[in-house]
Amino acid sequence: MRQLLIDGLSIEEQANIDSYLKRTVKSASIAGMFWLAVPDDLLGPAQLGHGDCGPFYFGIELGRNSVAFEFLVRSESNLHCSCICYATDAQRDHLLRFVDRMLKEEKIKA
């Protein structure tokens, strides 16, 4: 799995990230998992024409001392479809801007 991993988080940083994610993205049914939506204007060729599979998300997993951001674009309603694929450049940039904003706003130094 291709992902961006930020580890070495202090307890305070982990709590700050948890709070930030709960305020800004969708919580998953599994504890510590979150979903960052891919905006419709950033849907790639694989997602276009797959309206029934949407919305599309990046998975975020918050652990005890780390947070991982998946580069796989997932469907909310379908686990096995050709629309589930790794991010385009524009989608990846969207994810990285989100991460940069979170790190800055929450003053994460890890």
Image (tube, helix red, strand yellow):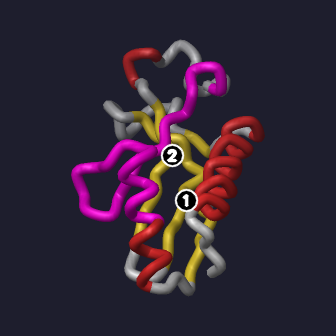
Whether tag 2 and tag 1 are in contact, CB under 8 A, the answer is: yes
Which class describes the residues within 10 Å of circle 2: few (<14), some (14-19), or many (20+)? many
* Of residues 82 and 42, the one drawn nearer to the viewer in this rendering: 42
Secondary structure under tag 1 reads strand
Question: What x and y, as percent, mark residue 75?
Answer: 42, 35
The single residue placed furthest to the left in the displayed view is 29
Gap between marks 2 and 1 measured at Cα = 7 Å
Q: Picture coordinates of residue 47 (x, y %)?
A: 56, 25
| Amino acid under disc 2 | Phe
Q: Quadrant of the C terminus?
A: bottom right
The residue that mark 1 highlights is: 69
Residue 66 to residue 16: above or below: below
Please tell me the numbered disc located at residue 99: none
Label 1 packing within 10 angstroms: few (<14), some (14-19), many (20+): many
**Residue positioned 25% across, 58% down in the render:** 30
* Residue 41 coordinates in the image, percent (x, y): 64, 20
Q: On the picture, is 50 further left or further right than 33?
A: right
Label 1 sits on what residue type? Phe
Between 27 and 80, the residue placed more toward the observer is 27
Residue depicted at x 74% and y 36%: 90
In the image, which residues are magenta?
17-42
The image quadrant of residue 33 is bottom left
In the image, taking residue 25 as reference, residue 103 lies left or right, namely: right
**97 is within the stretch colored magenta:** no
